[in-house]
Structure formats: C-alpha cells, structure tokens
Amino acid sequence: MGEVLPSPVGPRATTSPGGGAVVLPSPAAAGEGPSTRITRVGAVPWSVPRVGQVRGVDVLVVGAGFAGAVIAERLASQAGKRVLVCDRRPHVAGNAHDHLDEAGILVHQYGPHIFHTSAARVVAYLSQFTEWRPYEHRVLAQVDGRLLPVPISRATVNQLYGLELPDEAACAAWFASVAEPVAQVRNSEDIVVSKVGRALYEKFVRNYTRKQWGLDPSELDASVLARIAPRTNDDVRYFTDSFQAMPRDGYTAMFERILAHPNITVRLGVDYRELIGVVPFQTMVYTGPIDEFFGMQFGKLPYRSLEFRHETLPVDRVQPVAVVNFPNDHDYTRRTEFKHLTGQAHARTSVVYEFPRATGDPYYPVPRPENAALYRKYRELAQQTPDTFFAGRLATYQYYDMHQVVGQALTVFGEIAMARAGRPASPLAGRDRVLG
Ligand SMILES: Cc1cc2nc3c(=O)[nH]c(=O)nc-3n(C[C@H](O)[C@H](O)[C@H](O)COP(=O)(O)OP(=O)(O)OC[C@H]3O[C@@H](n4cnc5c(N)ncnc54)[C@H](O)[C@@H]3O)c2cc1C
C-alpha cells in the first residue's frame, strides 16, 4: 500500500478507488474548516520533511504535476519501479491543483483549467483515474459594454455590428472586406489585422495582449497570436477538440488516484535538493524549471507571471459563462466563475481575477527568439546529463496544455523504459514530440 502522507487538501478525497489510503489531512487540518486549508496553500505545512523514512528508490520524480505524476504512475505500475515523487509545493496536481475554498466551493488555485483533447490515448489513460463531467468551454469578451463570444466568429460580428451574415461564405467575404493585407507578416499585430482588420483587432485583441504580455502585439512574435484564427461559422465553443470534459471530482482527486500506487511515495513541501545525498536513486525525472536545475549558469529564462485574486460573492451566479475577458476595462484580463466548470450547486459563487505580472511564479514562457536560444543552451546541458530525464512545461520551456503534457509524459515513460532496458534514449527524447 502507498505510504500515507499529510496533505492540506482536506478530507474531500481520502481514499483511492481500490479503497487504499491515499492522502490524509494533516493533523492540523483535521477537524478544522476549509478556510484553514486555503490559507495554507502556498505555505509548507511540514517544517521537517520526513525524508529519512524513505530508503533507496529506483526513480526520483521531481514535481507532482501532470508530467511527474503520470511518469511516476507508469514507472510504478508498468515497470515495477519504486518511485519517490517530491514537490516543493504543499499539494499535488501542480498548476492544475483545485481545492474547496472557505465557502466550500471547488476552485482552481492557479486559474481555470479546462480539459480538452483529441488524443484518444490521453483520454483512455486519464479515464483510469477519473470519471468525467461533460463540459464545453465558452468565453465572452466585454466589448463596447456588451458580452460577445470569443474567439471572433460569425456570431461575434453578427452580434457586434447587427449583421445577418447567413453562412460561412458570407462571413469569409465580410472578413476579407475588412482585413488589411500585409505584405510580410512580421509580428502578432500583422497576423490579426491581416485576417480580421483593425477595428476588431482594436476592440478584442490589442489591449488584452498588452495586459497579458506587457507588450504591444506589434512587439510580439507572430506565433503568439497565430493560433487565434477567426471562425466563419457560428461555433462559439472555445475549443473544438473531440473530447471536452472536466474530471468529475476535480483535478486533485484525480491526481490522488494517479499517485495511489503502492510503489509510489509522495513527499510534499520538499525541494528535490533536500533529498540529494539523503535518498539514493538510480534515475531522476525532473519537471521543474530547467534553468534552475543548472544553477542559472547561462541566465534566467524569462516568464510572464500572474497574480490571482480569489473572491466569493453572495449570489448564485455572477456571469453567464465560466470566463469573461476584459480586453479594454480593468487591470485584470479575465474573471472565471468556477461553478460553471464544476457544475457544483451552491448558494454563493467563487470567482478568480487574473492580473498579469512581470515577476512571480513562472507561468508563460515568453516566445522570443533570444529566449528560445537561451533554452537551447540549457537543453544541450540536459542532453549530456546522465540518468536524468526532463519533462513538462518548465523543464522544456514550452507552453503546453494539460493533454499535451500527459502525451509527452507517456512518451518519456517509454524512453525511460528503453534506456533501462539497455537501449539508448535521449534524456529529452519526448520533448519535441508532444503528442496531443
Ligand atoms: C493560468 C493558466 C491556465 C491554464 N489553463 C489551462 C487550461 O485551461 N487547459 C489546459 O489544458 N492547460 C492549461 N494550462 C496549462 C497547464 O497548467 C499545464 O499544462 C500543466 O500544469 C503542466 O504540468 P507540468 O507537470 O508540466 O507542470 P506543473 O503543473 O507546473 O508541475 C511542476 C511541479 O514541479 C514542482 N517543482 C518545480 N521545481 C521543483 C523543485 N526544485 N523541487 C520539487 N518540486 C519542484 C512545482 O512545484 C510544480 O508543482 C494553464 C496554465 C496556466 C498558467
């Protein structure tokens, strides 16, 4: 049976599907209300990590987010390895962590996480650890005092301008009539203006991007906004993937089940550096920031950060969809109302506002050529580091959605298994082959 560990997540999910103990509330949290659990997020509840209790393991996995948890589970269940997973945060699930707030409403600590994928193997894998609640994400933007669907679609322009564009051909012709052709697309402004024209760019894109990145779209690589393609149809869903659903009991509960294997031990609130020389291991899987791993010897990889302001409001619902974007008003970019995502019934409602920041926790790699070049220098070092595999968004300096990280983790597991079987495998072999 997996070792029983303290956790700040509370008694919401304390048993594995098989009935084995997974994670128990810390002694301090037991008997206390959910508010204590929230205030503890971000702090380390165990001052003395119980590292001495762990004897040697086969694999040390650094990070209990999607990358670390999936690789740990595969190594334990498919390769019979003894795995120690550590995370310096006091909880599992990495950035996807969710928990009950003071009001008893399930919220996502690090901003809204919506699961979507078209990869059947990712769905099949995760479905071993969760049931799903069907959910199709919709986003509205507050523009000219109205709430309009984004991404920009035929529905958006019909509502904004009082048009009745009847079909895709009519909408494509309308976009063509307002688009400003650009001889050479050099940046993110060019790519948007050349598709939807300047008026829609100014209303929906320009100020949102300035807030999000602290840069004008004209200063950003074209790739940043290239994926925001205007739609000529009336599909107002934010994602178009074939599978769109939320883990029925939340992400944290799903992670607790992923990590419940008897061969896995989890240490929370522990930086992996505290374990070096204390717990012997043969192989390391590292999912933290790659520049930190190498002591920032070439300099720090730049990230855009976010500050989250969580609030509970004394109303049942505050907005018609889960996320409302505010391109032109307020300092925050968007407000998320969690009950839309989770389906939870509650008399009150909890929301989170996102304030983009230049410093803080690393969230979005800044896509500029000089940063990619800096990353490549670290990647070269990683490729020369024996018995160490690098996976996940921070170790590969890449923005990935959750399903992409799961796909990458499954691939990296295969590479580790090959390496342990004596066949050559690059420590970064899965990195560039993110399987959606
Ligand atoms: C605001 C925001 C919203 C998002 N929304 C979505 C969404 O709607 N849908 C979607 O698919 N994706 C979304 N994502 C992306 C999603 O968060 C990532 O795909 C996912 O969390 C990546 O998992 P990971 O394991 O690579 O990294 P992480 O979840 O960051 O896990 C890495 C872990 O490593 C730990 N760690 C780092 N260094 C050390 C160390 N030295 N010692 C011990 N532990 C360490 C960290 O504490 C962390 O918990 C969003 C991201 C952000 C920032």
Image (cartoon, helix red, strand yellow):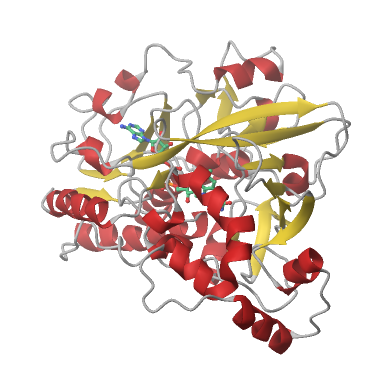
In the figure, residue 154 lies in which quadrant? bottom right
Name the residue at 64% across, 24% down. Answer: 10
| Viewer can see residue 242 | yes
Q: Quadrant of residue 312?
A: top right
Q: Position of residue 2 (x, y in %)?
A: 47, 35
- Which quarter of the frame holds ligand 1? top left
Residue 135 seen: no
Q: Depth check: 369 or 104 in front?
A: 369
Q: Is residue 333 left or right of residue 426?
A: right
Q: Is residue 298 above or below residue 128?
A: above
Left or right for 208, reference 414: right
Q: Residue at x 33, y 51 (%)?
A: 391
Which of the pair 365/418 is nearer the observer?
Answer: 365
Q: Residue at x 60, y 42 (%)?
A: 333
Position of residue 188 relative to residue 75, above or below, is below
Residue positioned most to the left:
384
Q: x, y percentage for residue 145?
A: 78, 48
User: How many numbered marks are there?
Assistant: 0
From the viewer's perspective, is residue 407 above or below residue 265? below
* Residue 269 place in picture, x, y as percent: 41, 23
